Amino acid sequence: MRWKLLGVLLLGLLILGSFSLVSANKTQNPWEEWAKEHTVKVLVIEKVSYKNGELIREVIYTGDDLRNKLNVGKLSRIEKIKVSGTTLEKKYPKGAQALMSGKSISRTYYKTTILTTSNDPFPWWDYPPYLPRWTWKVWYDEFSIPHYEKADPVNLVWEGGTKSEVKEVLENEGWYDWVVASNQYIYDPPQYGGSGWEEGDDMATSRTFGPRHHVRLWVIYNGKIIGSAHYEDRDHDVISFEQAEEKVALYYHSPWVITPDHYYLYNYISSPYNDGYATKIRKW
């Protein structure tokens, strides 16, 4: 009887340990849980016009899910990019002629995205590897209060150097410091010396039109420089994250040391492909 009782106890401990392991595995990625809570289905109302070679997109997000989760009636933003008539015909084959004649076209559709308020960022500084996972686009509600939508993955981390030194390497390879690009942000916690929502510093291999390689840079509170790099087409649509990550990293030679895919940031994307890892580039 004593041995049977001991066996039951051991079996119970084994089962309890298994449940604990499963539970631990489920909580290894706090981003996933946070993202689920901030996933919103929105009705997109898009108005497009074309003037002086510039495509203007006025976009509104609205819908019940937005009201219920963020307590706002709508979010809006305006995006402007330079495009040629040929590109316009490719992007809007049925509406290009109307756009080039000065008319606007509209469409509505639903999409699911990740949104948050300005005071509810994902607390990446609380979880290993203590790095931002994503960049964010800014939207404004009816009262001009900013909200943020998940944008591009972080895929580069520099350590041991300054942002000026990081940029100098790129400039020596022909990259431009002032370029046409949409603004994106990361949140750097003020309680540790950051400035809250901070706009990225853009560099690219062309000032305006693609195809080009493009990187956004930030300095976070612990002195590390993070980057989100991609290769984009003429219309600034992303073609590849991995290609740009590898290209940027290969510019850095001694005293810089490259460790490919060193940090896992849980920001995998199937298309355009991003493997979820960031390359570390350290200056010794």
Image: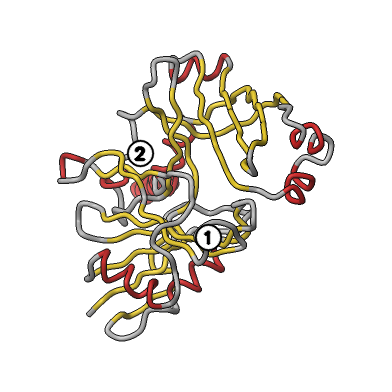
Quarter of the rendering containing residue 264: bottom left
Under mark 1, the amino acid is His
Q: Is residue 278 above or below residue 86?
A: below
Question: 246 or 69: which is nearer to us?
Answer: 246
Quarter of the rendering containing residue 121: top left
Q: How many numbered discs? A: 2
Going by the image, does 108 lie left or right of 113?
right
- Disc nearest the viewer among 2 and 1: 1
Question: 72 or 207: which is nearer to us?
Answer: 207
Q: Tell me the element at label 2.
A: loop
Which x, y percent locates residue 274?
Answer: 55, 59
From the image, which quarter does the C terminus lie in? bottom left
Which x, y percent locates residue 204?
Answer: 47, 63
Q: Residues within 10 Å of mark 2 (few under 14, many from 20)?
A: some
Under mark 2, the amino acid is Phe
Q: Residues within 10 Å of mark 1 (few under 14, many from 20)?
A: many
Which x, y percent locates residue 167?
Answer: 33, 68
User: Of the residues under marks 2 and 1, which one precedes in the sequence?
Assistant: 2
- Residue 128 shows in the view: yes
Cα distance, mark 2 to mark 1? 23 Å
Q: Which residue position is annotated with label 1?
A: 230
Q: Is residue 282 above or below residue 50?
A: below
Q: Residue at x 45, y 79 (%)?
A: 250
Q: Residue at x 34, y 59 (%)?
A: 226
Q: Which residue position is annotated with label 2?
A: 122
Query: Circles 2 and 1: CB distance less than 8 Å?
Result: no
